Amino acid sequence: MAVFRDDPYGAFNYKVTITPASGDEIRGGFSDVSGLNTEIQHADYREGTDAGNFPRKVLTTYKVGDVTLKRGLVGSLDVFRWVDKARKGEPDAKAAVVIELRNEANRDTVATWKLLNARPTKWTGPTLAAKGGTDVAMEELVLLCEDILFE
């Protein structure tokens, strides 16, 4: 449930839970979540008896954009196994994805986005460079979903 307050919430405290149809949760902390959006489609419509010389805008459908998750590469193969199921067209590749924004104390969920029937559409492995340093090996996962709910 969305919790109202006067000051905006920070974007740094959130939790991502991916539960494929198999019931096994995907492990690993995601450092970035982006692309939460929906676009409402309209069509132009004009009747011959309309007095004005302009079309009406009629709601047709809406679509949900792809959501991108990034995380540091960890020893778990959960994400890649899920990607592999999607590549093979297995029906249990669909998953429920819940993104929870938490308050600063990390005690309460203040907003929740639910991605319905989400599945991987793109996986990008880490960029590896032998230059030395402190860069983290990051992988990127792009999800498509059929609908998004906000609570």
Image: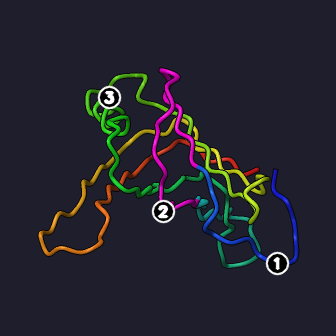
Residues at marks 1 and 3, CA–CA distance in whole angstroms: 42 Å
Give the residue pinned by disc 2.
Answer: 32
Q: Nearer the viewer, residue 106 or 32?
A: 106
The residue stretch that appears in magenta: 16-37
The type of residue carrying mark 3 is Lys
Residue behind mark 3: 85
* Sequence-first disc among 2 and 3: 2
Residue 73, compared with residue 39, is above or below; it is above
Going by the image, does 4 lie left or right of 99? right
* Mark 1 Cα shell of 10 Å, populated few (<14), some (14-19), many (≥20): few
Secondary element under disc 2, as helix, strand or loop, is strand
Contact check, label 2 and label 3, Cβ < 8 Å: no
Which element carries disc 1, helix, strand or loop?
loop
User: Against 31, is 142 above or below?
Assistant: above
Image coordinates for residue 136, horizontal then vertical, percent? 32, 64
Pinpoint residue 21: horizontal percent, then vertical percent. Answer: 50, 23
Q: Which residue is mark 1?
A: 7
Mark closer to the observer (2, 3): 2
Q: Residue at x 24, y 54 (%)?
A: 125
